[in-house]
Amino acid sequence: MIDRLAIIGVGLIGSSLSLALKQAGAVGQVIGYGRNRQNLEKGVELGVLDGFGTDIADCVRDADVIVVAVPLGAMQGVFAELKPGVSPTAVITDVGSAKSSVVSAAQAGLGDLLCRFVPGHPIAGNEKSGVEAGFATLYQGRRVILTPLEQTDADAIEVVEQMWRHCGAILEYLDVEHHDKVLAATSHLPHMLAYALVHHLSHMNEHEEIFRYAAGGFRDFTRIASSDPVMWRDICLSNGDALIDLIEQYQQELDRIATAIRNGDADELLKLFGRAKSERDSLIGNC
Amino acid sequence: MIDRLAIIGVGLIGSSLSLALKQAGAVGQVIGYGRNRQNLEKGVELGVLDGFGTDIADCVRDADVIVVAVPLGAMQGVFAELKPGVSPTAVITDVGSAKSSVVSAAQAGLGDLLCRFVPGHPIAGNEKSGVEAGFATLYQGRRVILTPLEQTDADAIEVVEQMWRHCGAILEYLDVEHHDKVLAATSHLPHMLAYALVHHLSHMNEHEEIFRYAAGGFRDFTRIASSDPVMWRDICLSNGDALIDLIEQYQQELDRIATAIRNGDADELLKLFGRAKSERDSLIGNC
């Protein structure tokens, strides 16, 4: 049971966490902090927040658990600002999509409180933003990856594990570098591909027509291009090396397809599409 | 009202058409032809078909409308085979995703029956295949593009329009070349991108892990990589020129993103993602 939870950055992820914990009866008070006062007021109105602060250090003062859910580029500043208010027994965690940059930010911003920090990443979300996008079941059956550091206190990890279990999530553990490599492949690269596609099509002469004739497949494929641009700018800048490697490898894969089309190489195309289909069907399921 | 409909190639598209027309009371008998006898028997069992033939010319003999729904590479052979059985008042249409290759196939295969042929393309479907994948509402509110030729008989066009209207579809008209260019952008390129992504990831050492940590966004993004490889091989070979152009332009777009990441160009990334998001949200809706 968390008596007082502070959420720094109350968007889809933070508000869904609050709603899930409230529904599970696993939290007392939830206090929010954010730069957009209207969003915080909406949070109170929706029952996501029991209150909000206008100063981070004040906001976290009596919290047992502090969840930092701001874009990656804002992490270091937030850690430094909240530090003066944090009680020594409190636990700090985050939800960032690239862990090495968060760990650097925590090292720089939290100093001797680093042992109370548990880097975390719920593999859940959608393309919506803001407190109104939150819903209590977002984490049901979804994975949350923790990437604890050598110096992370064991009791702090337990608190964070417990919190996510109350939301119905499945806990997983990866080291920081491995996490960033895997996420670059499953999440960061696909977002780049979707943004690049929509951006490219939006410059074609026929762009209105193109979107008019878009079927369900196109809608699904490009859904992630409706994600928050600031969040994704920061992810790019935070996991750049892994992402650039993958983009380069991916370009080679596209070259291979273009060459096969150019050469009319039916066998090569069939082999490639067949392997992709069977891999996806067997590992994700035909859905 | 169609008295007798012949469907050549009874997969998702053909069986959904039959179910929709039956539900609308707009068809008498539906006869299927295909190479997989088990699939045809299943079609009868499911009420999609009232019977099936083992010879195309026999199968189309008394049909008012003949719908060819085979992969693009099989079109020309099918047109030539069905020709001897077609009554002079019958209407022939197809559902192929690339129209210029279908038109060439029809010119070569149908000869003097070309005036009875209405090239068509329902912008509907999903990644499933086979007669069991069909459902009566697939075309509700979806667009069907017709690309009639100069010599196409007006009454033949009317019959095909009427057929699709009974399924709840919205009719649109494009010329062949324009259709192929627009579809390369909205459908053919995205399929290549999804196949390339899954194919690439399936070769990474961490591939099982990668698919394990795949969230909803990845599932949606890669859904089209579960599409039928034979169908997509044929689309690539049939609309190769438009597709290669687009792949090349798309690679430049990816280069631009990679360069911005490499240079830490936050403004450029934000601008690009922001434009993509607002374009998608305004033209497709945030869904």
Image (cartoon, coloured by chain):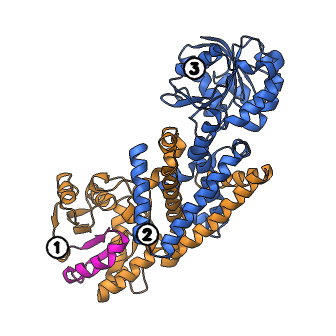
Chain colours: A blue, B orange
How many residues crowd mark 2 within 10 Å: few (<14), some (14–19), many (20+)?
many
Residue extent of the magenta highlight: B63-92
Instruction: Name the residue: 60% across, 54% down.
Output: A194
Q: Are marks 2 and 3 in contact (CB under 8 Å)?
A: no
Image height check: is A96 above or below A44? below
Q: Which chain does the numbered disc 1 sit on?
A: B
Image coordinates for residue B194, horizontal then vertical, percent: 51, 56
Residue on which disc 2 sits: B235
- Are the residues flagged by discs 2 and 3 from a single subunit? no
Q: Secondary structure at mark 3?
A: helix
- Are the residues flagged by discs 1 and 3 from a single subunit? no
Q: Secondary structure at mark 1?
A: loop
User: Callout 3, which amino acid?
Assistant: Glu
Q: Is residue B81 magenta?
A: yes
Instruction: Name the residue: 59% across, 23% down.
Output: A19
Q: Is residue B77 visible?
A: yes
Image height check: is A151 above or below B116? above
Image coordinates for residue B243, horizontal then vertical, percent: 53, 70
Q: Is residue B277 visible?
A: no
Residue on which disc 1 sits: B55
Image coordinates for residue B146, horizontal then vertical, percent: 43, 72
User: Callout 1, which amino acid?
Assistant: Asp
Closest to the camera, between mark 2 and mark 3, is 3
Q: Which chain does the numbered disc 3 sit on?
A: A
Q: Which mark is residue A161?
A: 3
